[in-house]
Amino acid sequence: MKRLGLIGGTSYHSTLEYYKAINAQVIAQTENNSNPELLLYSIPIDVMRRQQQDEINSVYLRVAQKLQEAGAEAIVICANTPHMAVEYVQPQIEIPFLHIGDSIGKEAVKQNYKSLLLLGNRPTITKAFLKDYLIENYDLKLIIPEEEAIEKSHYFVSNELTKGKFSKEAKTFYKELIKKHQHEIDAAILGCTELPILLKDESSTTPFIKTTDLHIQSAVEFIIN
């Protein structure tokens, strides 16, 4: 099995989901029922909350280099938003990132989804690192919520979900937002790694693209294959 590096901490709640699920799925899918070698580096979430691109780039480059030096054969960032550093970091290391955009894009192609609602915090919804990645590499149409909804989504992600609070109010907000756009989309991207936790028991006529689950699946496939 291959050795995988994980960059977590943003938030630690989603990092726990990655760590538990990767171990459980690898054990279930291997003949000797053995867990994989994982190298986990957890960074303070304040790095992302400050939203200083130069600082984010510097921190993720330093951590990626440490994981590479420790023997990682690829790196998974256990969150959506920190992927804003991948374009800067990837050319400066020799091992690949398993990009969450590829996990999303491949699932969209597999399911023949063309138009997707992008949910998450403000950077994930509005910046190019995920939105443009999906458009350019997978020829998808991305629907962006209105400004008021972006602001409210950012509030819930930053002030509740990443702090481990999964409120009824947040659940209702996302369900109603998805319903509002249901006639113009094929699926909704749960573009915050805590959103699948919030909506895990919810049913919807609009399919969910659960970025956490798909990214974990990509990690498991890399480790085993």
Image (tube, rainbow, N blue to C red):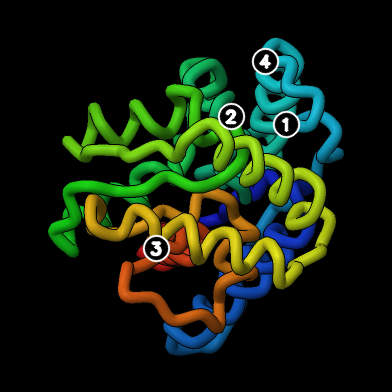
Query: Measuring 73% from the left and 22% from the top, which residue is drawn there?
Result: 51
Left or right of 80: which side holds 59?
right
Judge by depth and name the residue closer to the eye, 127 or 42: 127
Q: CA distance from mark 3 to mark 4?
A: 33 Å
Identify the residue under disc 4. Answer: 53
Earlier in the chain: of badge 4 and badge 1, it is 4
First in sequence: mark 1 vs mark 3: 1
Q: Nearer the viewer, residue 8 or 220?
A: 8
Q: Residues within 10 Å of mark 1 (few under 14, many from 20)?
A: some
Identify the amino acid type marked 4.
Gln
Q: Which residue is mark 2?
A: 123
Apparent side of residue 35 relative to residue 202 in the rendered image (left or right): right
- The answer to whether residue 106 of the structure is visible from this angle is yes
Answer yes or no: is residue 41 visible: no
Name which residue lies at 45% across and 63% down.
Answer: 210
Establish if 79 lies above or below 128.
Answer: below
Please rate how many residues cluster around mark 2, counting C-alpha atoms within 10 Å: few if below 14, some from 14 to 19, many from 20.
some
Q: Amino acid under label 3?
A: Lys
Label 2: state its secondary structure.
Answer: helix
* Residue 209 locus on image (x, y percent): 38, 61
Q: Are marks 1 and 2 in contact (CB under 8 Å)?
A: no
Give the distance between the C-alpha atoms of the residues marked 1 and 3, in whole angstroms: 39 Å
The residue closer to the viewer here, 118 or 68, is 118
Residue named by callout 3: 179
